[in-house]
């Protein structure tokens, strides 16, 4: 209501307004804002130029007719259709009287691109809108789509309506949680322990329409059944909301990796738990401290195979969040501006699916230290880092979106991203003996291989220098030998020792290939080191 009233005040003052919001909201916001402004709304549509109607708040008929025959679909406009819409817009702008407002529901579909690549359609649209700069306009654009800056500058005011507020004002002036205002009594009573205030942190990034769709789905899934032995709980509702967000997204998924599934690394877990407690309780923090206390993200760095991505999934599961794992090179694009657009879209989708965790694997490939060189590759890399900084500086604590970068080369990361107010570096190193013991125990349980405490101690002792993924492969291959192939072997201490020996031999061979000097003696003769089975057979 506050954002709507602000837009109305600008329109009443004769100022054009550009609103950035999701497509699902346009139909509802357009008629409400135009109606409250007291101006005669001229809705853009085909077949008649525009529909002039004095809309009262809550009267959607004029809007519905304009949307149905105008810009209601989000599909790319064909050449003929775009030309007709441009003609309709020109007629509406030309015929608009001083007390009118011309409503353009989907300005972004009429013209795309950037100032550097201004399309012919954008040039025509710019010409139309600037032809009568005194005409009052109300236009809408989606956060994931970009309009040229020259078009955006036509509007005196730009507003953003992207997320649900924590509280809304009722007609009586009372402030109530959005979890009460947008939830029916039947839905609240169905879920045992329903908390209207706590619900906000699980839905803050959704718009009102998407939120209502999710609530209807959750109620349908758990609707009262005759003779039901168990009443659904608030935790069930939170889970359904998380699944719904993941299913309505093309990229995000629901992780199921608890911290207990990661062996060892107690110090890393403790540091993450402390930070996640702050993130999960952000809405309860003092408002003036919220932005300073809530971390924006982490950079997990260390040798390969130490579980950096696994830790990221555990973080998402701990936050009851959806997760998106994107490889750094997937973001880069050969065309100017495309990489920045991909980054913007990733963050926009993450906010819609909040609470969400976005993991940039191989983070150094897109966040490398900026260069002063003037070649194309350096300029493109600098632009991606700049876009990342822009998104991080626009961080909103009430919308839990955590960014995690994983890298083997933190020395390559741009210094601006390593500032304490942006990313917090956490080193995930090769596991120590205690951690290797826990890792062995976790994977032995997972693959169903019986191991005694003495055997676990032996494995932890002889796997020094191996990472968690290599230790996992010992139990994976041992279990595969039991289940697959003609010559099946039991995964006993002897077989596990053979697998560890093979791993160490392969690692030694790789190191010699990287540095040939390691394989030669002092007189220059080639030195061969054989690694046989690691002796675990004597352990029960």
Image: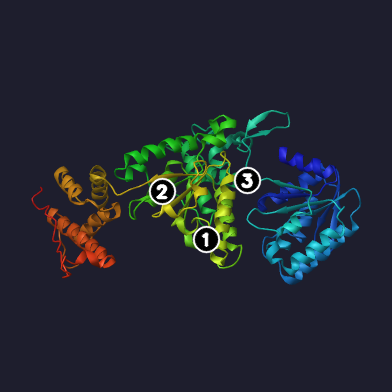
Q: Is mark 2 on a helix, strand or loop?
A: strand
Q: Is 198 placed above or below 91 here?
A: above
Label 1, residues with CA under 10 Å away: few <14, some 14-19, many ≥20 = some
Q: Quadrant of residue 1?
A: top right
- List the residue tagged with mark 3: 207
Q: Is residue 69 left or right of residue 483?
A: right
CA separation, marks 2 and 3? Answer: 32 Å
Say which residue appears at 51% left-offset and 56% top-offset: 251
Q: Which quadrant of the view contains residue 285? A: top right
Label 2 neighbourhood size at 10 Å, few (<14), some (14-19), many (20+)?
Answer: many
For disc 2, the marked residue is 300
> Mark 2 against mark 3, which lies toward the viewer?
2
Horizontal side of residue 112 vs 296, given as left or right: right
Task: Note whether 185 is above or below 86 in the view shown.
Answer: above
Closer to the camera in the image, 261 or 393: 393
- Rendered view: 169 above or below 531: above
Dot 3 and dot 1 residues touching (CB under 8 Å): no
Q: Kindly state the secondary structure of the residue where label 3 is placed.
A: loop
Q: How far apart are marks 1 and 2 (CA)?
A: 19 Å
Q: Earlier in the sequence, mark 1 or mark 2?
A: 2
Contact, CB < 8 Å: mark 1 with mark 2? no
Q: Earlier in the sequence, mark 2 or mark 3?
A: 3
Residue of label 1: 331
Residues 99 and 305: in front is 305
Mark 1 falls on what kind of element? helix
Whether residue 444 is visible: yes
């Amino acid at each position: 209501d506050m954002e709507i009233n602000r837009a109305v005040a600008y329109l009443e003052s004769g100022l054009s307004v550009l609103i950035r919001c999701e497509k699902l909201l346009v139909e509802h916001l357009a008629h409400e804002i135009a109606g409250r402004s007291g101006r005669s709304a001229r809705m853009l549509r085909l077949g008649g130029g525009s529909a002039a109607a004095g809309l009262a708040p809550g009267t959607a008929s004029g809007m519905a007719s304009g949307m149905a025959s105008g810009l209601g679909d989000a599909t790319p406009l064909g050449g003929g259709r775009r030309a007709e819409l441009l003609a309709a817009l020109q007629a509406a702008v030309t015929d608009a009287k001083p007390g009118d407002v011309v409503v353009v529901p989907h300005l972004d579909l009429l013209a795309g691109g950037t100032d550097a690549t201004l399309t012919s359609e954008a040039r025509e649209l710019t010409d139309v809108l600037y032809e009568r700069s005194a005409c009052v306009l109300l236009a809408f654009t989606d956060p994931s789509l970009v309009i040229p800056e020259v078009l955006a500058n036509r509007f005196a005011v730009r507003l953003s309506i992207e997320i649900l507020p924590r509280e809304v004002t009722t007609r009586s002036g009372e402030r109530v949680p959005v979890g009460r205002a947008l939830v029916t009594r039947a839905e609240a009573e169905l879920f045992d322990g329903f908390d209207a205030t706590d619900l906000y942190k699980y839905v803050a990034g959704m718009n009102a329409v998407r939120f209502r769709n999710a609530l209807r789905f959750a109620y349908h899934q758990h609707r009262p059944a005759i003779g039901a032995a168990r009443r659904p709980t608030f935790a069930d509702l939170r889970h359904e909301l998380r699944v719904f967000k993941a299913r309505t997204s093309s990229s995000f998924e629901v992780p199921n990796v608890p911290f207990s599934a990661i062996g060892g690394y107690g110090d890393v877990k403790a540091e993450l738990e402390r930070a996640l407690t702050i993130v999960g309780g952000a809405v309860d923090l003092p408002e003036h401290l919220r932005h300073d206390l809530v971390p924006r993200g982490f950079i997990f760095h260390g040798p390969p195979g130490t579980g950096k991505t696994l830790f990221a999934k555990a973080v998402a599961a701990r936050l009851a969040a959806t997760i998106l794992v994107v490889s750094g090179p997937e973001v880069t694009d050969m065309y100017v501006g495309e990489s920045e657009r991909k980054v913007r879209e990733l963050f926009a989708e993450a906010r819609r699916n909040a609470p969400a965790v976005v993991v940039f694997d191989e983070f150094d490939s897109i966040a490398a230290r900026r260069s002063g060189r003037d070649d194309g590759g350096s300029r493109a890399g600098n632009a991606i880092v700049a876009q990342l900084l822009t998104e991080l500086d626009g961080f909103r604590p009430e919308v839990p979106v955590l960014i995690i970068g994983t890298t083997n080369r933190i020395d390559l990361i741009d210094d601006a991203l390593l500032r304490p107010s942006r990313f917090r570096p956490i080193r995930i190193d090769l596991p120590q003996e205690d951690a290797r013991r826990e890792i062995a125990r976790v994977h032995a349980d997972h693959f169903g291989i019986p191991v005694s405490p003495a055997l676990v101690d032996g494995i932890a002792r002889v796997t020094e220098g191996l990472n968690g993924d290599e230790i996992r492969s010992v139990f994976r291959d041992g279990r595969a030998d039991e289940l697959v192939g003609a010559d099946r072997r039991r995964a006993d201490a002897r077989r596990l020792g053979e697998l560890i020996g093979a791993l160490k031999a392969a690692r030694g061979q790789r190191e010699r290939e990287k540095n040939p000097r390691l394989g030669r003696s002092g007189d220059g003769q080639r030195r061969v080191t054989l690694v046989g089975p690691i002796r675990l057979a004597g352990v029960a």
